[in-house]
Image: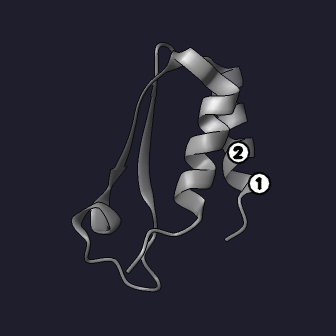
Amino acid sequence: MPLPDAVPRFRDAAVAAFGGRVQCLLLTGSHARGDAHASSDIDMWLLLDEVSPCDLRRVAEIIASIPS
């Protein structure tokens, strides 16, 4: 199954929001293993240099802005 459009959308939005603070962005779970199916969720880790409550709100806004 190809990667959902949400993956590059999240990546692009996270980099736009946090820039050089992004240390790593990882895709894990069934999509990373290549055994995802139509109802699989998307497991991603966004690692920043440090995290504030404002950063957590921004990540939630990014996720909410991506169509499911």
Q: Residues within 10 Å of mark 2 (few under 14, many from 20)?
A: some
- Label 1: how many Cα within 10 Å (few below 14, some 14–19, many 20+): few
- Residue type, mark 1 in image: Ser
Residue at the outermost bottom position: 38
Q: Residue at x 45, y 68 (%)?
A: 3
Residue under label 2, please give it.
62
Residue 52 visible in the current orientation? yes
- In the displayed structure, would residue 53 be above or below residue 62? above
Q: Position of residue 32 (x, y in %)?
A: 29, 61
Q: Is residue 5 left or right of residue 38?
A: right
Q: Amino acid at mark 2?
A: Ile
The residue beneath circle 1 is 65
**Is residue 51 among what the camera can see?**
no
Q: Give the image quarter of residue 64.
A: bottom right
**Badges 1 and 2: C-beta atoms under 8 Å apart?**
yes
Which residue is depicted at the point 69% across and 28% down? 17
Q: Report the front residue among 25 and 55.
A: 25
Q: On the picture, is 10 further left or further right than 29?
A: right
Q: Is residue 26 above or below residue 42?
A: above
